[in-house]
Amino acid sequence: MRGNKKEKQIQKIILMQEEIRLWIQYVFQQWESKKQEQHNSFPKLAYRETVAFESSKSYQEIKKLSVGMVREMKTYKKEKLLLQITELHQHMQSIVSAVLETIQKYYAF
């Protein structure tokens, strides 16, 4: 039972790590595609926040983690990491939500 919980924790950490990476990529792609338009309504704040987020020490530490590294961690470290990555995940999710709202508001047909 305990091993199953550990594996679920590891999967959750790795999944959130990947989602964060994809969200950063999405924000940058949207920024690049929208900045060519004359009336760019893409939120510059979202772009700036994403740049700051990506270069933050917290994200850089999480970014370089591998499945093997997470597996080798002690339980308390994994739990601490899960809290940290959940916080980062929620922050990036809020940035992407703002981007999606803006796109929907200004680019919906």
Image (tube, rainbow, N blue to C red):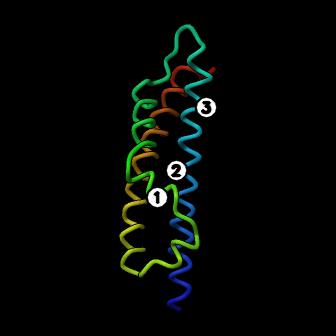
Q: Amino acid at mark 3?
A: Gln
Q: Residue at x 51, y 72 (%)?
A: 70
Q: Residues within 10 Å of mark 1 (few under 14, many from 20)?
A: some
Residue position for label 2 = 20
Q: Amino acid at mark 1?
A: Ile
Q: Is residue 44 above or below residue 7?
A: above
Could you tell me if the residues under marks 2 and 1 are in contact, i.e. CB atoms within 8 Å?
A: yes
- Give the quarter of the figure containing the C terminus: top right
Q: Residues within 10 Å of mark 2 (few under 14, many from 20)?
A: many
Residue position for label 3 = 29
Q: Secondary structure at mark 3?
A: helix
Could you tell me if the residues under marks 2 and 3 are in contact, i.e. CB atoms within 8 Å?
A: no
Q: Position of residue 21 (x, y in %)?
A: 56, 48
Q: Is residue 52 above or below residue 58?
A: above
Q: Secondary structure at mark 2?
A: helix
**CA separation in Å, label 2 and label 3:** 14 Å
